[in-house]
Image (cartoon, helix red, strand yellow):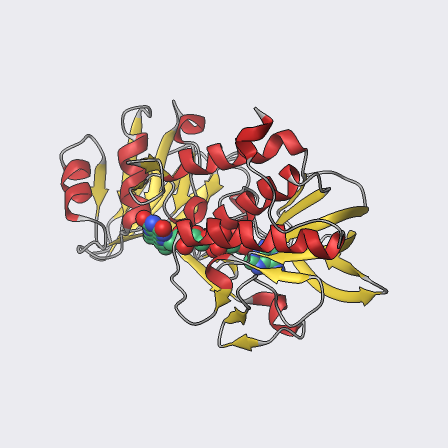
Amino acid sequence: MTDAQHHDVDVLIVGAGPTGLYAGYYAGFRGLRIAIADMLELPGGQITALYPEKKIFDVAGFPEVLGRELVDRLVKQVEPFNPIWILGTRVDGLARNDERWDVTLSSGATVTTTIVVITGGIGTFEPRALPVGREYEGRGLIYYVPQPQALAGKRVVIVGGGDSAFDWALALEPICPSVALVHRRDAFRAHEHTIDLVTNSSTKIITNAEVTGISGEDNLTSVEITTKSGEVINHEADVVVAALGFVAHLGPLAEWGLEMSKRTIITDSSMRTNLPGVFAAGDITEYPGKVRLISVGFGEAALAVNNAMTVIDPTKSAFPGHSSENS
Ligand SMILES: Cc1cc2nc3c(=O)[nH]c(=O)nc-3n(C[C@H](O)[C@H](O)[C@H](O)COP(=O)(O)OP(=O)(O)OC[C@H]3O[C@@H](n4cnc5c(N)ncnc54)[C@H](O)[C@@H]3O)c2cc1C
C-alpha cells in the first residue's frame, strides 16, 4: 500500500479477489494506469479469507491448484503492470466529477479515475472476533493463515471447527512444535477426510471448550481454555488463529446508485452497470444465466476491462489483440 493521499488512475478496481486481480492484468495489458483496492489486508478475496489451503479443480489449465497458489499466480500476473495496491482499505463513495469519478476511501485518501470496475464479490469481510483477547491483534492473534510457512516454529492454537480450522491445522502441524485445535462443540463442520487426517496427527484437539483468556507481556504467550465441565487449561502458545468464519456485508456500494437485485449488481453483456464508466464483474454481478465461479469471473473481468477501454479511448476496439503476439 502506498502512503500518498491521492491517486489519479485510469481504472480503479474495487475488490482484489480473483476477478479483480485478473481485471488488473487486463487493464495493465491495455496500457492503463491501475489501482486495486480491497478491505482485506491481502489480495485473494474469498480464496484468501476462506479457503487458501483448499485445492481448486475447475480453473482452466490447472487440473488442480491450491487456493493460495492461484492467488500468488494472479498477483504475479498483474505485478508487471505496477498497480497501486490500496489494501486494508474500504472503498466508501463515488461522486461524478465531469467525465470522471472521485472516489473516497476509508483511510481518508481519494482516487480520481475514469473507470471503476467493481469486483466486490459477496462484499467486505470481517472476521468473527473471539470474545476475548482482541488487544492481541497484531501481537499473536490472527484470523487467517495465507502463508503457513510464516508461522513455522510457532506454538499455535486454532479456534474453530470448520474447514479453515482443520485445513490450517493440517498445514501447520508438520512445521510447528505444537498445534492445538479448540472447538466449543464435539462435532465439526469440516470435510471428513481432513478431520481424520488432523485427528491422526500430533494436533491436540480440545472439544467442548472455549478460549476464555489470552495473556502475555508484549506478545501473546499463553491461552486460557475452559472446558464445558469447568476445567481450566493454561496452554502455552505464540499464535492464536481465530478461525470462526467471516461475516460478509455488501457495505457502502449499496449506496452508490447502482441498479441492484438483492446483493448483486445488474450488468449488461459487456459488464456495464447503469452508471457511466462503472463496470462490474465476478460474484457481485447478476444477469440471466449468471453462474458464480472463478472461471466465470475471469471471463467477466476480461469483458469489463476491454469494454471499458472503449470508454477511455473511443478510437480503441474492445478486442485487445492476442497477448501471444507480444511474446
Ligand atoms: C469455501 C469455498 C470454496 C469455493 N470453491 C470454489 C471452486 O472450487 N471453484 C470456483 O470456481 N469457485 C469456488 N468458490 C467461489 C469463488 O471463491 C468465488 O466465485 C470467487 O472468489 C469470486 O471472486 P470475486 O473476485 O468476484 O469476489 P471475492 O473473492 O468475494 O472478492 C471480492 C473482494 O472485494 C472486496 N470488497 C468488497 N467491497 C469492497 C469495498 N467497498 N471496498 C474494498 N473492498 C471491497 C472484498 O473484501 C473481497 O476481498 C468457493 C467459495 C467458497 C466460499
Q: Is residue 192 left or right of residue 17?
A: left
From where the camera sits, is residue 269 visible? yes
* Residue drawn at the location 51% of the way across and 49% of the way down: 19
Q: Position of residue 213 (x, y in %)?
A: 41, 48
Left or right: 227 as drawn, with respect to 321 = left
Res. 63 image quadrant: top left
Relative to 63, is 68 on the left or the right?
Answer: right
Front in this rendered view, residue 255 or 183: 255
Task: Between residue 305 and residue 46, name the one nearer to us.
Answer: 305
- Where 79 sits versus 268, above or below? above
- The answer, for residue 45, to whether it is visible in the render is no
What's the residue at 47%, 51% (across, down)? Answer: 299
Choose between 169 and 180: the one closer to the eye. 169
Identify the image quadrant of residue 99: bottom right
The residue at 54%/71% (across/down) is 266
Vertical placement of residue 23 versus 128, above or below? above
Quadrant where the C terminus sits is: top right
- Residue 178 to residue 228: above or below: above
Q: Residue furthest right?
A: 98
The x and y percentages for residue 96 are 80, 67
| 246 sits to left or right of 164 | right
User: How far from the left and from the top, in percent, is residue 319?
Assistant: 60, 47
Q: Residue at x 20, y 30 (%)?
A: 202
User: What is the total number of numbered labels drawn onto the structure image?
Assistant: 0
Residue 32, horizontal then vertical, whole percent: 71, 42
- In the picture, the quarter occupied by the N terminus is top right
